[in-house]
Image: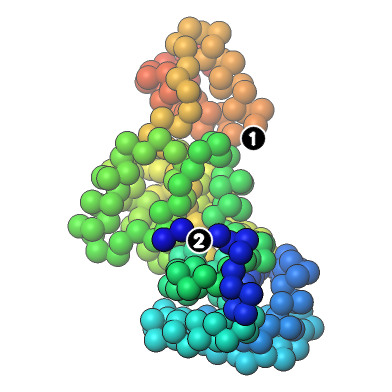
Amino acid sequence: MTTSEGAPQSEYGVLVLAATPIGRVADAAPRLGEELATAAVVAAEDTRRLKRLTTDLGVTVTGRVVSYFEGNESARTPVLLEALLAGERVLLVTDAGMPSVSDPGYRLVAAAVEAGVRVTAVPGPSAVLTALAVSGLPVDRFCFDGFLPRKQGERARRLAALAAEERTMVFFEAPHRTETALRAMAEAWGDDRLAAVCRELTKTHEEVRRGPLGELVAWAAEGVRGEVTVVVAGADGGPSIADDEASLRAAVQEREDRGMTRKDAIVEVARLAGLPKREVYNLVHGR
């Protein structure tokens, strides 16, 4: 079925997907408050969090508020679609970030598109893009793989399927499973694969730990708290590097200039050049 987003049925309403802050409420788009105040229906993943958000924004919701979460998404989608077909403006918000990105929303979007209802969005905070941007890893090509499976066998199969993935990869993870996930990644892709663990992004205790997976496993063993996003370099991580001394020194220096530690820069350059880390280390340190 082919649809035109620019030519919806005029009598239908509009589905608005609104990004909500992943940390600081000041990051909310000004239009979020406008939509919350004027929508005929506000569907929220957690109505209690919605109440806190509107209080912080100083906004009064005038429309109907309904819950829309994983447990009732299938049953509630037809109800919201009916409201859209009746000409109402329906606003969908989740606890943090953009609806339908590892959050409820996909079913409603698919149903609205199938019915010819216009779907639009209030852009805003995204843990995926924020983590990618601050990771220090290549950002020209990336993929988002959501949460890894909880079961060991399924997780191992997923990671094995991504072994040849050349794009930078972004994952969500629960804090109490972060060490397990990082260890599984190291076993599947090697201890030297560069990664970044981003926790509590944009919040007071924001922390970004960068380094080889093996080192991040050891760090995570001490315990991880807060919302976690993991960014991992792809199988190539970038173009190959010539193995002459001048090229190797220049490649390490270029990465240090971008903010990498010398140790991480040596690890990445050695991997891209296909050389032992010790050889690049000795070269950089004049040994």
Residue at x 54%, y 11% (from the top left corner): 247
Amino acid type of disc 2?
A: Thr
Task: Find residue 45 and report its horizontal and vertical position in percent.
Answer: 52, 80
Task: Find residue 167 and report its horizontal and vertical position in percent.
Answer: 44, 38
Which coloring applies here? rainbow
Residue at x 59%, y 68% (from the top left corner): 8
Residue 212 or residue 61, whichever sits in front: 61
Q: Residues within 10 Å of mark 1 (few under 14, many from 20)?
A: few
Residue at x 56%, y 47% (from the top left corner): 132
- Asked whether, in this view, residue 283 is left or right of residue 190, the answer is right
- Asked whether, in this view, residue 229 is left or right of residue 49, the answer is left
Residue 84 or residue 19, whichever sits in front: 84
Amino acid type of disc 1?
A: Gly
Q: Residues within 10 Å of mark 2 (few under 14, many from 20)?
A: few
Asked which secondary structure carries label 2, the reply is loop
Which quadrant of the figure contains the N terminus? bottom left
The answer for how far apart the CA atoms under marks 1 and 2 are is 46 Å
For marks 1 and 2, the one nearer the N-term is 2
Residue 287 or residue 90, whichever sits in front: 90
Q: Quadrant of residue 200?
A: bottom right
Asked which secondary structure carries label 1, the reply is loop
Q: Which residue is mark 1?
A: 259
Task: Find residue 204 and report its horizontal and vertical position in percent.
Answer: 68, 65
Q: Quadrant of residue 192?
A: top left
Residue at x 45%, y 52% (from the top left corner): 144
Residue 264 shows in this picture? yes
Q: Which residue is mark 2?
A: 3
Task: Find residue 58 and report its horizontal and vertical position in percent.
Answer: 79, 83
- Asked whether, in this view, residue 156 is left or right of residue 276, the answer is left
**Against 259, is 94 above or below?**
below
Residue 116 or residue 141, whichever sits in front: 116
Q: Quadrant of residue 93?
A: bottom right
